[in-house]
Image: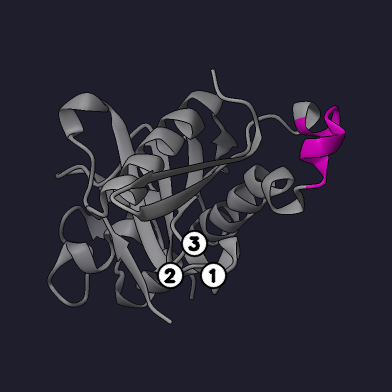
């Protein structure tokens, strides 16, 4: 198993695309979970328990850490979720695991994660980012890491950034790898700004 994090009008449910080129087939399974009410109204989609519970599970994983840090909870944002879904699919199709162009997402933060397909729950994916708090120390960004490198805590600080109020996420998968993309409004990790308190 492997996992890795990088500090980086669709219907809800699971969308699968299959195509071939030169005899090579790649399957992209993009989880697009937007409105719980819409999910519940569609029997076919409602059977996708992972997709149906995706926004709530992502929010819970984030908001547990935000509560521990003493900041207000996030809310789910459909537009951010849709944008995250498009970019997750792009990563899966290209195999290039890197942040999107900041100019294309002004005022929007981004966390990225990748790991072995099917080996990690949503909570474990987000937990990889949360685990960075062991290196976190409250302070003025970027001086917030015990290691001296803010990138060692950058996913965590985006999760608990005081001015961030909303999040939208999506997962895209190949037969071997799952990719999680979360987008945040407003973006965190801004130089010169204070960032909260680690759980003690």
Query: Which residue extends farthest top?
Result: 9
Which span is picked out in magenta? 39-47
Query: Residue 131: image x %, image y %?
Result: 42, 73
Query: Residue 166: image x %, image y %?
Result: 50, 34
Where is mark 2, residue-wise? 128
> For numbered disc 1, what is the local secondary structure?
helix
For the residues marked 1 and 3, what is the alpha-carbon distance in whole angstroms? Answer: 6 Å
Query: Which residue extends farthest front?
Result: 23
Q: Residue at x 55, y 27 (%)?
A: 78
Mark 1 in CB contact with mark 3 (< 8 angstroms): yes
The image quarter containing residue 135 is bottom left
The answer to whether residue 75 is left or right of residue 196 is right
Q: Residue at x 54, y 29 (%)?
A: 77
Mark 2 in CB contact with mark 3 (< 8 angstroms): yes
For the residues marked 2 and 3, what is the alpha-carbon distance in whole angstroms? Answer: 5 Å
Q: Which mark, by number, is residue 124?
A: 1
> For numbered disc 3, what is the local secondary structure?
helix
Q: Residue at x 77, y 38 (%)?
A: 45
Query: Residue 147: image x %, image y %?
Result: 17, 77
For the residues marked 2 and 1, what is the alpha-carbon distance in whole angstroms? Answer: 6 Å
Query: Residue 96: image x %, image y %?
Result: 22, 53
Mark 2 in CB contact with mark 1 (< 8 angstroms): yes
Classify mark 1: residues with Cα within 10 Å, few (<14), some (14-19) or many (20+).
some
Classify mark 2: residues with Cα within 10 Å, few (<14), some (14-19) or many (20+).
some
Is residue 42 rendered magenta in the image? yes
**Rendered position, 31 above or below 77:** below
Q: Which mark, by number, is residue 149?
A: none
Classify mark 3: residues with Cα within 10 Å, few (<14), some (14-19) or many (20+).
many
Q: Which mark, by number, is residue 126?
A: 3
Is residue 150 rendered magenta in the image? no
């Amino acid at each position: 198993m492997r996992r890795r994090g990088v500090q980086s009008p669709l219907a809800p449910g699971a969308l699968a695309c299959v195509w071939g080129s030169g005899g090579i087939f790649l399957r992209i399974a993009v989880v697009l979970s937007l409105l719980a009410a819409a999910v519940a109204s569609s029997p076919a989609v409602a059977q996708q328990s992972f997709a149906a519970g995706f926004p709530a599970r992502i929010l819970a994983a984030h908001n547990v850490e935000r509560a521990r840090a003493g900041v207000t909870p996030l809310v789910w944002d459909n537009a951010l979720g849709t944008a995250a879904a498009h970019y997750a699919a792009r990563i899966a199709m290209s195999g290039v695991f890197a942040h999107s162009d900041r100019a294309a997402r002004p005022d929007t933060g981004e966390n990225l994660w990748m790991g072995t397909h099917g080996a990690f729950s949503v909570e474990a994916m987000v937990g990889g980012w949360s685990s960075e708090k062991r290196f976190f120390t409250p302070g003025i960004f970027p001086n917030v890491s015990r290691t001296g490198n803010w990138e060692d805590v950058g996913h965590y600080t985006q999760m608990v950034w005081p001015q961030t109020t909303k999040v939208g996420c999506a997962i895209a998968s190949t037969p071997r790898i799952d990719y999680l993309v979360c987008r945040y409004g407003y973006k965190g990790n801004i130089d010169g700004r204070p960032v909260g308190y680690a759980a003690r």
